[in-house]
Amino acid sequence: MKQNNYETMRDQMRPYFLTFDQQEMIRKFNLDYDEEYLYIRFCGRDYRIGRMTGIVEWSEDAFVSNTEGDYSESMTIYDVLCYSKPDCCLSGEFASSSSLKGTVYTGMNAGNGMASTRVGNFFNENMEKLERACVALAGIPEGKGDIAYRIPLFDFLPLRFSFWQADEDFPAEVKMLWDSNILSYMHYETIWFAAGHLLGRIEEIMRKQTT
């Protein structure tokens, strides 16, 4: 099957990943590892990166079975492991992506209004499922919104997810706030990949709920 451009770019990153210091990755983020893989948790799911292949895979059964990560998953993980600054650390303060230091205001915020009308309506009509999904992602109630949680994007990197239910004047709204030092962990463009992937994970978890 012919690859699309995103898959090609993902695959091109594999050998480049292998040029980086894996011991530094392990040290910086306290990663579990063995001779074959580095292990990392992202959006409530376990991932591993082949130490000799650079392939990113995820599993929900302790890697009895596995699935290769898509472009957004893989590139977010590569970016954090390879390009995060040596002294990256959390500030404990949260901000929209457009108000981060070193960014130019464009009026567009990663995670703000990213939910399509379809997803926004789905969240709006299933508030209990949405809240349970946030809890399933190890979320802790925090922030403003009808539903608001502090969710670990990675175990070492939280964000704030907020949802406002629609009313007679305003449509449903999603907002995400990022640690103000997020650009020490990933490039600005990667924030968009991460935000989109988190929304997808929330919807996926919601749809698996039976009641």
Image: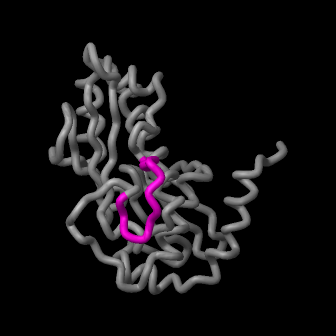
Is the magenta region chiefly helix, strand or loop? loop
Q: Which of the image's four quarters has the C terminus?
A: top left
Instruction: Please indicate whether residue 131 sits to the left or right of residue 185 in the image.
Output: left
Query: Relative to residue 129, is residue 197 depicted above or below?
Result: below
The number of discs equals 0
Query: Could you tell me residue 23's position as x and y percent?
Result: 47, 86
As for residue 84 lying within the magenta part, the answer is no
Q: Quadrant of residue 9?
A: bottom right
Magenta segment, which residues?
A: 99-110
Q: Is residue 199 left or right of residue 189?
A: left
Q: Is residue 78 visible?
A: yes
The residue at the point 44 percent across, 27 percent down is: 119
Question: Among all residues in the image, which is located at the extreme right?
Answer: 2
Of 100 and 80, nearer the camera is 100
107, 138: nearer the viewer = 107
Residue appearing at x 27%, y 13% in the figure: 168
Is 136 situated above or below 63? above
> Is residue 107 on the magenta stretch?
yes
**Residue 131 drawn at (x, y percent):** 24, 33
* Residue 172 pos. (x, y %): 33, 25
Question: Residue placed at 24% from the left, 71% from the top?
Answer: 91
Residue 111 spot, x, y in % from top left: 40, 45
Q: If the image is split into quadrants, where does the N terminus sit?
A: top right
- Residue at 58% from the left image edge and 83% from the top image edge: 20
- Considering only vertical position in the picture, is 209 above or below 18? above
